[in-house]
Amino acid sequence: KEKPFSKIILIVDDDPDVASIFSIGLEDEGFVVDAYNDPLEALSNFKPSFYDLLLIDINMPKMNGFELCTQILKFDVNVRICFITAGETNIEALREVYPTISVGCFIKKPISLEYLVKRIKAELE
């Protein structure tokens, strides 16, 4: 059957299992997904004005999710970003450290694929 839309999602999560499960779950819903486990690789392959939404893990080695977003926003100021985190996030402290990032969407791990898909569709409406 025909899927009603085909949005492009970029996933960056240093846990290959998480990135893989998220990718498969979203692709099953008709999304097109690029997934990376290395934030530096994701950054070097980033295509401005290409992605509908970025799904980025906060705690990663080499470069955290916020640092990655700060870099990405230099190329694409309009991109929508959802952060994924297993830890607690102090959004106020975050805004002070990264004032350029518009913090719209936080998704807490562990998360069901069903909820992930619902959140992403809501973000894209």
Image: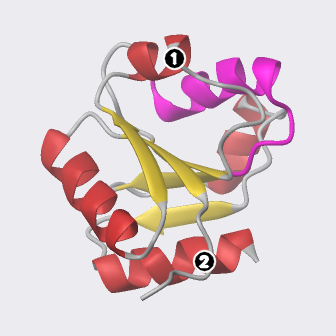
Vertical arrangement, residue 31 with respect to residue 59, above or below: below
Residue located at (43% from left, 13% from top): 40
| Whether label 2 touches label 1, CB < 8 Å | no
Q: Percent from the top left, x then y, of residue 117?
A: 45, 77
- Which residue range is magenta in the image? 64-80
Which quarter shows the C terminus?
bottom right
Chosen colour scheme: secondary structure
The one nearer the camera, 5 or 36, is 5
Amino acid at circle 2: Lys
Q: Crowding near pointer 1: few (<14 within 10 Å), some, many (20+)?
A: few
Q: Name the element at disc 1.
A: loop
User: Alpha carbon of mark 2 to alpha carbon of mark 1: how far?
Assistant: 24 Å
Q: Label 1: which residue?
A: 45
Residue type of the residue flagged with mark 1: Asn
Q: Is residue 12 visible?
A: yes
Q: Position of residue 98 (x, y in %)?
A: 74, 31
In the foreground, 56 or 1:
1
- Looking at the picture, how far across and down is residue 74, in whole percent? 80, 18
Q: Is residue 57 left or right of residue 70?
A: left
For the N terminus, give its image quadrant.
bottom left
Q: Is residue 69 above or below residue 3?
A: above
Q: Which SS type dominates the magenta stretch?
A: helix
Quarter of the image for residue 109 reads bottom left
Residue 59, x across and y down, in percent? 37, 36
Residue located beneath label 2 in the image: 121
**Residue 77 forms part of the magenta stretch:** yes
Mark 2 burial class by Cα count in 10 Å: few <14, some 14-19, many 20+: some
Q: Is residue 90 above or below residue 125?
A: above
Q: Nearer the viewer, residue 31 or 94?
A: 31
